[in-house]
Image (cartoon, grey):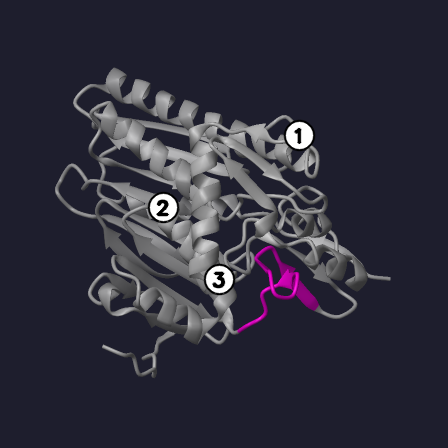
Amino acid sequence: MKRRTTAPINAMIVFLMAVLLMAGCSANDPGWSEKTEPALGTVSQIRIHSDDRSKGDTAIREAFLRVQEIENHLSFWDSDSQIGRVNANAGRASITMTDDVLFMIEEGLRHYDLTDGLFHIGLGTLTRLWGLNSTEPRIPETQQVQAALEALDLQHIQIAGNDVMIRQTGTAIDLGGIAKGYALDEAARVLRDLGIHSGFLNFGGDVYALGEKPDGEPWYVGIKEPIPGANQLVGRMGVVNLSVMTSGDYERYVVDEEKGERLHHILDPRTGRPAANELASVTIVSDTSLQGDIFSTAAFVMGLEHGYRYVFETPDVEGLFITRDGEVYQTPGLEGIFELMNDNYVMTEMEIEFDE
């Protein structure tokens, strides 16, 4: 008999990152506005600086309203969302999508091609089987996983204008690998549109640094030690107008105590099971959080060497790769930006010959 246990995201660690971000910010400065809300299945925080406290409070409220709108449109677990309805109508009818959901679906399909199928928005049936992003995680039987793998063909997704149809039953769209990144970008856009140019957005440990701190310094983002329940950082990096997004095997998982395995939530579309390689986490630094969400997920599934090459060869995207053995690899653009702060980890050079 398999006993199953789960580990949710550790809220204390999430806000440890926020403490680093706020370092040097005076709590007595009346220009600061801050709000924390549950959103996108995690604890989400926005903290900004403006010349008018009421203006800042309004901007944060509007940003969270936009995030809630996005979540209502694309929640995989909500049968009334657009994604819920298109999945329920697979093989029967099309659903008219709003422009934002259509954009995410099209981006997902584009990156499916760019990653040779390793970034996959059609894993919904597997998502349900494992339930690792829900309150009821489980370990499915091998034959259930195999049956789900047979329904992963994204050619069954048909788009005509804003109408989307899944032509085959058993196929289901899950935008979980792109939604948080898009929501972070949209929240930052709302803040900018309302005249906010300094602050940070921290959605469950994934961060967008908006402008500089009021004193002209970068925002320092802590990189969590990729161990369940750990309360230490591996290091930090100073960023301005950049996204820092992480995918790891330590946040949401189920434990098969009979086999001594920890089975995490990042599924490999080749096997239908959690990606199994040497990586513990991948952090992507990029201009947009959407890029960071996609690249961190895809690179984690690819594994160290393939994932590093994938990030290295993409302009304006940098990556930090941490292995389960405590080795840290960074792409060249992070030199001088990432600072190692933990003696249990060692910076290691990637020994790969790249074509110039």
Q: How many marks?
A: 3
Amino acid type of the residue that numbered disc 3 sits on in the rendered structure: Pro
Pointer 2 residue = 289
Please identify the residue farthest to the front as the structure is shown: 160
Please state which of residues 91 and 239 is positioned toward the viewer in this rendering: 91
Residues packed near mark 3 inside 10 Å, few (<14), some (14 to 19) or many (20 plus)? many
- Tell me how far mark 3 sits from mark 2, CA to CA: 20 Å
Image position of 30 with respect to 197: above or below: above
Residue 211's x, y, as percent? 20, 40
Residue range of the region highlighted in magenta in the rendering? 261-277
The reply to whether dot 3 and dot 2 touch (C-beta < 8 Å) is: no
Would you identify the image quadrant in which residue 308 lies? bottom left
| Image point (76%, 57%), residue name | 147
Pointer 1 residue = 79
Please state which of residues 264 and 172 is positioned toward the viewer in this rendering: 172
Pointer 3 residue = 226
Amino acid type of the residue that numbered disc 2 sits on in the rendered structure: Ser
Please identify the residue farthest to the right as the structure is shown: 1
Residue 335's x, y, as percent? 22, 67
Residue 246 magenta-highlighted: no
Residue 276 magenta-highlighted: yes
Can residue 161 be seen at all in this image of the molecule?
Answer: yes
Quadrant (top left, top right, bottom left, bottom right) of the C terminus: bottom left
Identify the element where label 3 is drawn.
loop
- Tell me how far mark 2 sits from mark 1, CA to CA: 26 Å
Residues packed near mark 2 inside 10 Å, few (<14), some (14 to 19) or many (20 plus)? many
Q: Nearer the viewer, mark 1 or mark 3?
A: 1
Would you identify the image quadrant in which residue 167 lies? top right
Q: Image check: 130 left or right of 58?
A: right
Please state which of residues 99 and 72 is positioned toward the viewer in this rendering: 99
Amino acid type of the residue that numbered disc 1 sits on in the rendered structure: Ser
- Tell me how far mark 1 sits from mark 3, CA to CA: 33 Å
